[in-house]
C-alpha cells in the first residue's frame, strides 16, 4: 500500500454502532448464540467485543423498529472449520424462535471459504465464516486491486 499522510491522524479504530430495541433479548443473542463478550456501561448502550482493538456499540432505540440493512452490510464472525459453519447453521435453524432470528440463508462456498448469513432480532445481518485473520493479512499485504 502506498504511504499517504491522512488529514485525520487517528490512533485506532474505536467502534461502530448498531441498533436494538430490547437490550436483554439482544444481549442473550449476542452472548449465548454468537459468543460475543458484552458489557453495559450505559443505560442506553451495551458494547460488543471479541478481543482486538475495536468494538461495536449496540444502542437502544426508544420507539420503532431497527432499520434493516441490505444483506451486503453485515458483521462477519470467523470460526475455525467447515464443521463449525455447519454446526452454527444447524443451531441457527433449530433455534430461530428462541433467539428471534428472522432469516437464515443457505451455506455457501466462495473463494474456498464456507459461510452463511443470518438476520437477527434487530434487523442486523451476521455472517459466520471460515475466513481467518491470515486471509485479511494477505489481502492487505497485496494492496489494492489493479484495474
Image (tube, helix red, strand yellow):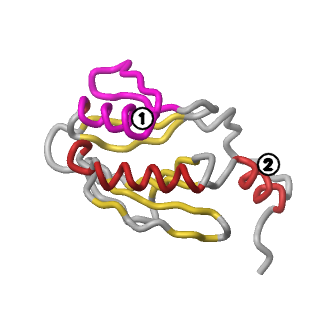
**145 to the left or right of 63:** right
Position in image of residue 25 (x %, y %)? 24, 35
- Chain-order first, disc 1 or disc 2: 2
Extent of the magenta region: 24-49
Image point 45% across, 35% down: which residue? 35
Residue matched to label 1: 57
**Which residue is the extreme one toward the top?**
41
Under circle 1, the secondary element is strand
Q: Nearer the viewer, residue 143 or 83?
A: 83
Residue matched to label 2: 5
Image point 17% across, 37% down: which residue? 62
**49 to the left or right of 120:** right
Q: Nearer the viewer, residue 23 or 19?
A: 23
Q: Which corner quadrant of the image does residue 50 belong to? A: top right
Circle number at residue 120:
none
Image point 72% across, 53% down: which residue? 136
Amino acid at each position: 500500500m502506498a504511504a499517504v499522510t491522512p488529514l485525520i491522524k487517528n490512533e485506532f479504530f474505536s467502534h461502530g454502532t448498531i441498533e436494538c430495541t430490547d437490550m436483554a433479548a439482544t444481549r442473550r443473542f449476542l452472548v449465548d448464540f454468537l459468543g460475543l463478550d458484552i458489557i453495559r456501561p450505559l443505560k442506553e448502550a451495551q458494547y460488543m467485543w471479541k478481543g482486538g482493538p475495536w468494538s461495536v456499540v449496540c444502542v437502544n432505540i426508544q420507539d420503532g423498529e431497527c432499520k434493516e440493512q441490505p444483506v451486503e452490510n453485515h458483521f462477519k464472525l470467523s470460526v475455525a472449520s467447515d464443521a463449525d459453519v455447519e454446526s452454527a447453521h444447524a443451531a441457527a435453524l433449530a433455534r430461530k424462535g428462541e433467539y428471534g432470528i428472522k432469516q437464515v440463508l443457505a451455506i455457501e462456498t466462495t473463494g474456498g471459504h464456507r459461510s452463511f448469513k443470518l438476520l437477527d432480532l434487530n434487523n442486523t445481518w451476521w455472517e459466520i465464516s471460515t475466513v481467518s485473520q491470515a486471509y485479511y493479512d494477505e489481502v492487505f499485504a497485496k494492496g489494492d486491486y489493479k484495474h
